[in-house]
Image (tube, rainbow, N blue to C red):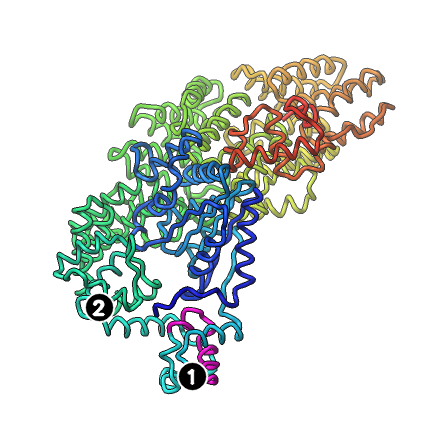
Amino acid sequence: MGAQPRPLLGRDAELARLAGVVLGARNGASGALVVRGDPGIGKTSLLRATAEQADGCRVVQVAGYESEQAIAHAALDRLLRPLRDLVGAIPAHHAGALARATGAEDGPPPDRFLVGLAVLELLSAAGRKRPVLCTVDDAHLLDPETLTVLAFVARRLYAEPVALLLASRDDPAVDAATAGVPALRLTGLDPESAGALLRASAAPGADPLLLTRVAAATGGNPLALIDLADELTVQELTDSGLGEEPVPVGRHLVAHYARTIGRTPPATRSWLLVAAADSTGAIDLVEAAGRALGIPAGAAVPAEDAGLVDLGGSTRFRHPLVRAAAYTAATGAERRAAHAALSVAAREAGLAELEAWHAAKAVLGTDDAVAGRLERVADLAGARGGSVSRARVLGRAAELTPPGPARARRSVAAAEAAMAAGAAQLAAGLLDEVDERDLGPVERARALVVRVNLGVFTADPAVIVRATADLLAAARLLHGRDPEREQRALLQAFDFTLAVERRAAGCTLAELGGRLREGAGVREGPAAVVLAALGAHVLDPYPEAVPAMRRGLACVRALDGPAALPFLTAGVALATALGDPGARTEVLAAAARAARDTGALQVLDTALWVASIAELTGGTPRRAAQLVEEVRELRRAIGYDAEHVANVAQLAWAGAPRDHVATVSRAAAATGFGGVESSATGALAIRDLAEGRYGDAYAALAPEMGDPFLQVTPTRVPDLVEAAARSGHADAAAAGTAALEARAEASGSPWVRGLALRCRALVVAGPGSEELLRESVRALDAAGAEVDAARSRLLLGEALRRARRRGEAAHELRRALRALTATGATVFAERARSELRAAGADADRPPEEAALVDLTPREQTVARMAARGDTNAEIGAALFVSVHTVDYHLRKVFAKLGVTSRRQLKEHVGPA
């Protein structure tokens, strides 16, 4: 105890690994590492040694405190204080998010990922002055929001002069948060190093054989070797059962420290208890609580003399196990008294969160007044963007609340907060504690909504297929009681209906439409307009539904920022139903922009995913694939597995093996996501069309016409008509064409009109078809439907070839081939090549962005975004990296492609 710091023995490889991360930062290649290991294994020493050797680096450090776990972003606030002078160098909305997260400003709660982007930019700004080393000790004691933010930053560091090192005991929450971040697992010292450290720590003349046994018994744990060396005699080895196998070091060390504490004066032991209960290291707070408990001044001095604590600007225990020993040695009554005194001291210091935390620790049984204070603290956590902290604090408040409706209400609110943060296991545990008999209608509905979202999050098929029915049941419970929540539940019910399509159980589309229409009348506002539009979409004949749908779509398009996010799926459905791919793209882009600006990455994930699927109807397979890559990048940023992310319909368009597409489709269907199954069926049918298997395409699509589903089925009518016309089903082709023409007239959509003209050309299949196809191309070009226009041009080229007008046919086919290749419509491009060869024309493969082959996937994404005019800041926000990293990638792209401007880049990359 009290020994001077020694050089780290037996840690050369580990020190080199950490030094390598720092060296990378010095060279502009940032990195992160999580150091994991048992108590006393040397994590803190490694961080300290690395920081001491980081010459030329700006070092910022923080350690987690248990008492801050209820204070959202508390540790982050402490970590970033030395960098506050640089906040002006980062984008204003990032600076605002940081200010709200740390309580410096009031405003809407910032999403944790927006805070993460802000921290990333702040560290990048600091690194531009000199390399930054950021060390985080006791990460398992961080507040959950700080842990999430730092894990996000660790995954997104790339080309900044920044190194981030985190140290943690084994902890499932840390493992989950830091998924995807490289890790270093610390084990005990090798026998030679352990022996050397033990000999340096033991009393002179110690028995070498005994020292060897001690080294083996402690498993080479450095702290145990230093602090137990003088205590472990042969008799103690025998008495404690130390033998050939390593012992639970933590338990023995705690017992050792408890004996050391027991030799200090009673007043010192009392002071140590208060300091351990505080855990923040705030000397003024501990002294104030000590005075309230009658602890005399100077009681801390013997603890410092014994090497238990270091008293500088704060109280620093020798090791967390010393704190544990001081705390557990006291009786329960003594611990509660210490927390009560600390609660009073925190209140006098204006520390509301800390006051409530200690007050809760001081309670034996239940205390509704303290629970109320915790609820107010939970609201503070929520205001700082701390959904997980809010959930945990509300959960504790519920525990302190006497059984009854108030406890149930707090538990449900805690589960809502946990689900909002994606903490599914925590949400489930909180709901399991609820006594359903104590729930009123509103709380029962709120709990039901959480259970639905929990089941969807965990991919429970039984919940997914009943999600619409259960959300309608929740809306019914809310009817006349909470109109805002009722409308929100109804919008979500519609969203889930699109996800499951025909696999929905427990309600019909007619029942859904009726409740949507009813819900529109309970409260005025955008939700009312949109719900009325959706009700018309579900219930009314198409011509009669169009006016209401137009009003709904206009309402969604008029919304800006976060207000638009709840209406994402509804806006896309209405735009598709009205045949307006431009409006659909606008809605998706606005939602993605708002989600990025607010850091709502889970909403952004949905927006990108929906956009990828939508691009296959009226858009391009190439953009669909690019959006899938953006989803992968996003999920890597969040820490989810991204390697198996796939848009199954896009795979079919790209020519993936049919059995692979079918396997993915069946897996999605088994989970309840009928929308994925349906999109795969439609895409495979389109592939059948491209490959000339018209009968197979008709067999796949015809059953859907007898059981139409909202806006989905009408988008497949043009493919059905082509399959029917080419496979001998003339009546079906004529009926489909007539239906599409009626829809075009009612909607006034150039896109639908162009498709209807193509269908009419296929039905007449005579001399008049040529002009119909030309008109179709013009309409589809005007609508911006590139692939559909190219498909009509392909049919035109085929018709001209059959009419032996080979020169004209080759002209149209080449134009179709260029468009189909540029848009990624691979399967139709192959058909265009075959037609060109049949027309006697050159069908060599045109260049297909050969220049991009040498670029990495991220470089390709950056290149395409830059070519379409996005700024570096916009690219960074889209890819969740710093502006500095975007600049780094662009420099590499320019060098590889041999260009010097974005204009030249666009020539290489082609259309977005």
The image position of residue 689, as x and y in percent, is 70, 32
Where is mark 2, residue-wise? Answer: 330
In the rendered image of this protein, does residue 68 appear above or below residue 841? below
Quadrant containing the C terminus is top right
Question: Which amino acid, mark 2?
Answer: Ala
> Magenta segment, principal secondary structure?
helix
* Residue at disc 1, secondary structure: loop
Q: Are the two marked residues, 1 and 2, in contact with CB atoms closer than 8 angstroms?
A: no
Does residue 342 appear to the left or right of 206 in the view shown?
Answer: left
Span of residues in magenta: 206-227
Does residue 227 appear to the left or right of 311 in the view shown?
Answer: right
The image position of residue 166, as x and y in percent, is 45, 53
Q: Which mark is residue 579?
A: none
Which quadrant would residue 364 be assigned to in this image?
bottom left
Where is mark 1, residue-wise? Answer: 205
Question: Which amino acid, mark 1?
Answer: Gly
Closer to viewer: mark 1 or mark 2 = 1
Q: Using the rendered image of the protein, determine whether residue 405 is visible from the camera's viewpoint.
A: no
Q: Residues within 10 Å of mark 2 (few under 14, many from 20)?
A: some
Does residue 381 appear to the left or right of 652 in the view shown?
Answer: left
In the rendered image of this protein, does residue 597 appear above or below residue 187? above
Q: Residues within 10 Å of mark 1 (few under 14, many from 20)?
A: few
Q: Determine if the magenta segment contains residue 209.
A: yes
Which quadrant would residue 38 be assigned to in this image?
bottom left
Q: Residue at x 26, y 41 (%)?
A: 379
The image position of residue 721, as x and y in percent, is 66, 26
Quadrant containing the N terminus is bottom left
Q: Residue at x 34, y 63 (%)?
A: 318
Using the image as rendered, state which of residue 256 and residue 531 is in the foreground. Answer: 256
* Residue at disc 2, secondary structure: loop
- Which residue occupies the extreme right position in the image? 840
